Amino acid sequence: MASTIEKKEHSQVVISLESSKEEWNEALKKAYNKNKNRFQVPGFRKGKVPYQLVCQYYGEGVLYEDAMNEIANAQYPEAVKEHDLKVVSRPEMDVTDINENGIKYTITVYVKPEFELGQYEGVEVPFKEQVVTDEDVDAEIERMRKRNASLEEVEDRPAQEGDTVTIDYEGFKDGVAFEGGKGEGYNLKLGSKSFIPGFEEQVAGHSVGEEFTIEVKFPEDYHAEDLKGADAAFNVKIHAIKTEVVPELDDEFAKDVSEFDTLEELKADVRAKQQERADKDNKAAFENETVRAVCDNCEIDIPDSMVQNEVEQMADDQAARMSNQGIALDMYLQYVGQSMDDFKKSLEPMARVRVKSSLVIEKITEKINPEVTDEDYNEELAQIANTYKIDVEEVKKSIGEDSAFIKDSIRARKTVEYLASKAVKVEPKPAEEPAAEEAKTEE
């Protein structure tokens, strides 16, 4: 097999190949054997028409497509290996010459782009760490109080925002009750915005036992077609008004909601846990900002096929996440009025960033060659097992002998940690302060 390559712009490579007369004839015979049951010639049973007669009756061209695929399937992988091509796209075949002496053809592919690394050690990274404040601790304690609040009935005043009212209601459009517009003994928290705009505000101010009518207008984007933008009236009766009563903030509260005896001990525990989360977020955010800074020092002409492959992966990941919540991605997009094409288009900027980061990290990993120890490998398996709530032995069984991708993942992570350890943290300007949570999300 003879093959040559021609490198073109944008990481495109054209592989030129050809076959000998013997190889071509053998491929034609294989194509004949593959399809012989399809050929029908008077006087012969199916599958029994001789090769030469098939060529005379149908024309040899009837075998060309399968024969060409036979040749390409054998030669293309060898050419990729021979020229050490890192292909990132589907191959496109083009026949340039075909006759009794063989076939000449080209296969066009895109490969991983070649590029030069910029500075990757000691890059300056504008970054401001998350700091746990007294206000953060107090806010969490307040959330704990609200989670442990009780509802107490109120009889000496009308309902107000924040109250939970027990109501009966029935909705009418043009004087006719509509489907789904009736409820009895419904508990509604005023201010929750769980009903259509204007409903909760008009319930406020009424007392237990009152029956009244409120008028509202359904939103133009309401899910029920016949109610979009429609005026409606609701008959409402209040059966009960309950207000949220939070527990006193004292040592007794700490004892009730935790294993601690004092409020100060509870606050100290809350602060410690928040600090642990902040430290993890700060580490992840700084690593992301470091990778971003390192990537900014590189110019890479990324093939569109790599971006589109990443877009497909991101879309699949999103679909899987939504499926776990019982939501189909296509149905969700239909609900929000976005086509699948537009959704994927919106993923392209982030996909391009992710591809560039992957290429840069891969190249730096090759240069610094971080070691992966048995301890590193076993810790990674344990983490995978913990994530999917399965036994480590199940993880090992699913991986089998192919542990390379796990080790590659560990090496990549070690490379990122190395870059962060060499980076120089600088005070950001107000307009460029990175949000740790945003950086964490990008990861």
Image (tube, helix red, strand yellow):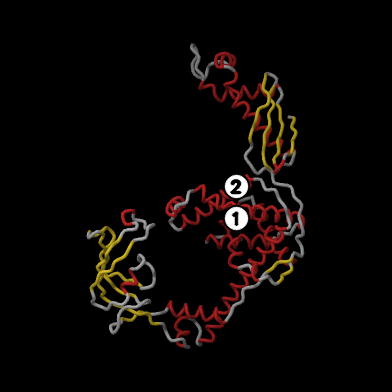
| Residue 57 spot, x, y in % from top left | 55, 14
Instruction: Say whether marks 2 and 1 touch (CB < 8 Å).
Output: no
Q: Nearer the viewer, mark 2 or mark 1?
A: 2
Element type where label 2 sits in the image: helix
Given residues 388 and 366, the one toward you in this image is 366
| Residue 225 spot, x, y in % from top left | 34, 53
Instruction: Identify the residue at image location x=43%, y=78%.
Output: 146
As drawn, is 240 to the left or to the right of 221? left
- Check disc 1: other Cα within 10 Å, few if <14, some if 14-19, many if 20+: some
Label located before the other in sequence (2 or 1): 2
| Residue 129 spot, x, y in % from top left | 64, 73
- Which label is found at residue 309? 2
Q: Quadrant of residue 73?
A: top right
| Residue 376 spot, x, y in % from top left | 67, 62
* Residue at the spot of label 1: 396
Amino acid type of disc 1?
Lys
Given residues 369 and 228, the one toward you in this image is 228
- Which label is found at residue 339? none
Element type where label 1 sits in the image: helix
Instruction: Identify the residue at image location x=60%, y=18%.
Output: 60
